[in-house]
Image (cartoon, grey):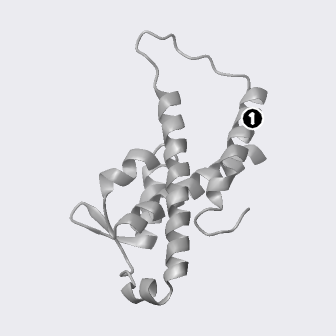
């Protein structure tokens, strides 16, 4: 029961990180770019709920609610550089996770249907995957669990 809840929390945290990483690159993000990687993690309704808290929908895109502060980068260049480096590392981890999910979810047309693992093994596998992904959760806000 706890492993399932932890997996759900980690999925939501990864989704949050994906959304913020997209907005870190650009204040306007096309909706399809967000759905492409994130809907494997959360439902479309959960994604939209998160987006409405951070952005406004305009012409097929989501626009971040807060305007970039151009003065901040000038006044606090070292902080800006550290944040840029942190987001670059976060994006690399997220890309690796998406790549693993994408590769593992692809099944050749000629392959037999996969067997369901027993419930006990599924829980251990999910807990192991959650533990490996734990570093991603702390990346956006700097806090662990």
In the picture as drawn, the residue positioned furthest to the left comes out as 59
Label 1: element kind: helix
Is residue 116 visible in the rendered image? The answer is yes
Looking at the image, residue 4 sits to the left or right of residue 91; the answer is right
User: Which residue: 77% across, 34% down?
Assistant: 124
Percent x, y of residue 89: 55, 57
In front: 55, or 144? 144
Rendered location of residue 130, percent (x, y) = 69, 45
Which residue appears at 51% of the width and 86% of the height?
76
Towards the viewer: 65 or 49 = 65
Asked if one can make out residue 1 in the rendered structure from this viewpoint, the answer is no
In this figure, which residue is indicated by the disc labeled 1?
123
Name above or below for residue 76 compared with residue 50: below
Is 38 drawn above or below residue 67 in the view shown? above
What residue appears at the point 49 percent right and 46 percent down from the top-left corner? 95
Q: Is residue 77 left or right of residue 123?
A: left
Q: Position of residue 109 (x, y in %)?
A: 40, 14
The quadrant of the rendering that contains the N terminus is top right
- Give whichever of 3, 131 is nearer the camera: 131
Q: Quadrant of the C terminus?
A: bottom right
- Identify which residue, 84 or 101, lies in the foreground: 84
Q: Position of residue 101 (x, y in %)?
A: 52, 36
Q: Can you say whether 108 is above or below 98 in the image?
A: above
Please rate how many residues cluster around mark 1, counting C-alpha atoms within 10 Å: few if below 14, some from 14 to 19, many from 20: some
| Residue shown at the point (50%, 77%) measured from the top left | 80
């Amino acid at each position: 029961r706890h492993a399932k809840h932890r997996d759900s929390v980690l999925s939501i945290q990864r989704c949050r990180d994906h959304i913020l990483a997209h907005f870190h690159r650009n204040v306007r993000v096309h909706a399809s770019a967000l759905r492409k990687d994130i809907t494997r993690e959360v439902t479309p309704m959960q994604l939209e709920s998160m987006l409405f808290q951070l952005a406004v929908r305009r012409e097929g895109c989501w626009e971040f609610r807060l305007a970039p502060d151009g003065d901040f980068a000038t006044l606090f260049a070292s902080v800006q550089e550290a944040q840029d480096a942190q987001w670059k590392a976060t994006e690399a981890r997220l890309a690796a996770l998406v790549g693993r999910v994408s590769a593992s979810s692809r099944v050749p047309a000629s392959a037999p249907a996969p067997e369901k693992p027993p419930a006990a093994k599924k829980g251990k596998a999910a807990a192991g995957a959650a533990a490996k992904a734990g570093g991603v959760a702390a990346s956006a806000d700097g806090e662990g669990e």
